[in-house]
Amino acid sequence: MRNLLKVFVLSWPAVLCAAPGASPASLLGISLADGKNGNVLGVPMQIVILFTLLTFLPAAIMCVSPFLRIVVVLHFLRQALGTQSTPSNQVLIGLALFLAIVIMQPVAAEMYEQGWAPLEKGTIKFEQAFDQGTKPLKAFLLRYAREKDLKLFLDVTHSPAPRKPEDLDLQVVAPAYILSELRTGFQIGAVLFLPFLVIDFAVASVTLSIGMIQLPPVMISAPFKILLFVLVDGWNLVIGSLVRSFYR
């Protein structure tokens, strides 16, 4: 997680520096201080901008990591079981977050070693560190992004077709990955619904045939669905399948 945070912070120093050689001036009411490489923003303003950029970190973690697929599938699973708010949203999000961290740990380590570590040592510049640091992330996203979705965002952004997938820009790969993961999550959710839907049909047919209309069929079928899920060790099967789907 710390490595992911450090890589994300790679993108903010470029915003903080003014053009080298410019005279001291005011930018949007913010005074520029003199620095070795020209005029730069003061430390308080740098902190404000840094914390502003960090507000995008949760969205980045949710959208460009396995978190997206996992939380969608877990939501569908809860709806299929008919347990309403059990497990709670906090539990599902926490589980999805920790699973995403486990899966993304090797990628985060590569991003840190290729991008942030050389930048700390001063062997490369920020632009090179950003390009090298995002390569492992881009490779991970490309592994699960559909070609159809990549083509869609190539057309939307009017970007030229690359010679190889690795040449695609992150602004094309990231939204294509999000669309692909949403599609995959909905497919898995639909499959999870089927066995529980059969139980709902069976219970509804039996209750209607015997004229039991005092209780809704959903209330009667809920214990049977939970019992089936527990007997087949459903949590182990679902979580194991989700994690293994990212190691294919």
Image: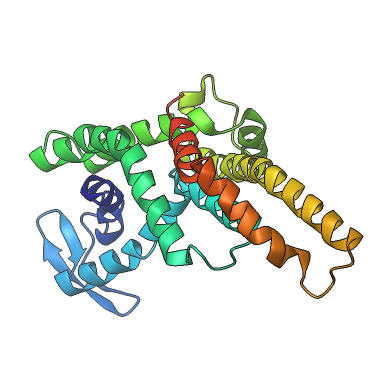
Residue that lies at the very extreme toward the front in this rendered image: 210
Residue 119 percent across, percent down from the top left: 16, 40
Taking 112 as reference, is 51 above or below it?
below
Residue that lies at the very extreme toward the top in this rendered image: 163
Residue 99 percent across, percent down from the top left: 37, 45
Residue 88 percent across, percent down from the top left: 47, 66
Q: Residue at x 32, y 41 (%)?
A: 102
Q: Nearer the viewer, residue 65 or 236?
A: 236
Taking 195 as reference, is 185 left or right?
left
**How many marks overall?**
0
Residue 114 percent across, percent down from the top left: 23, 32
Q: Nearer the viewer, residue 189 or 183?
A: 189
Q: Nearer the viewer, residue 132 or 43?
A: 132
Q: Residue at x 63, y 53 (%)?
A: 225
- Say which quarter of the image contains residue 220: bottom right
Instruction: Let me know if residue 23 appears in the view.
Output: yes
